[in-house]
Image (cartoon, rainbow, N blue to C red):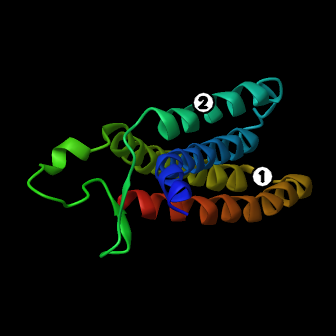
Amino acid sequence: VAQYVECDRYIVAGMWCGACIGCLLLVTFRLFELLNMSKRFENQTTILIVLATCYCLYFAFFTPPILTNSKAKAMFYSPVIGDVPSEVYVNWPHTVNNLLIVLTSATLYVLLCVVLVTKQGAMSSDAGRARMTANGPIFIQASLICIFNVAASLE
């Protein structure tokens, strides 16, 4: 069991950062879809998935692990043992990822809301209104998925 816990420490940050980049890609795809520019991503989807996977693997294998504290039943940068300063254990790439997710997600969702409201107001035909009505659930879905990542990143 101990060997699985050791391995788990290293991949947790990679899985978290992979989920974060996945949420950014989701909102970006939704935004370009609303702007009728989704054709730009058709041929590049595989490249974006490979880049997101490399991003995930970087955090899993090339950054310091997040350590488990059994007393607090949580994962912290510092294991709180001895007189070792907590700065020794800080994972700066992970911190930058969390700040980037908060700032980028907020910016992209503000843009998504502006585009959604602008397009909905500009639509005068029945087909246009039907399309915007169909995009409403897409916006809600993307928002609900990503709100949890933003909240956890702020934590």
**What kind of residue is marked 1?**
Met
Q: Quadrant of the N terminus?
A: bottom right
Judged from this view, the residue extending furthest toward the left is 83
Q: Which residue is mark 1?
A: 123
- For residue 54, the mark is 2
Residue 117 pos. (x, y %): 63, 56
Residue for point 31% across, 75% down: 72
Mark 1 and mark 2: Cα distance apart in space: 40 Å
Residue for point 41% across, 56% down: 153
Q: Is residue 32 above or below residue 67?
A: above
Q: Is residue 148 above or below residue 58?
A: below
Mark in the foreground, 1 or 2 = 2
Q: Residues within 10 Å of mark 1 (few under 14, many from 20)?
A: some
Q: Is residue 123 left or right of residue 95?
A: right
Residue 98 pos. (x, y %): 40, 48
Dot 2 falls on a residue whose secondary structure is helix
- For residue 147, the mark is none
Closer to the camera, 20 or 81?
81
Closer to the camera, 15 or 51?
15
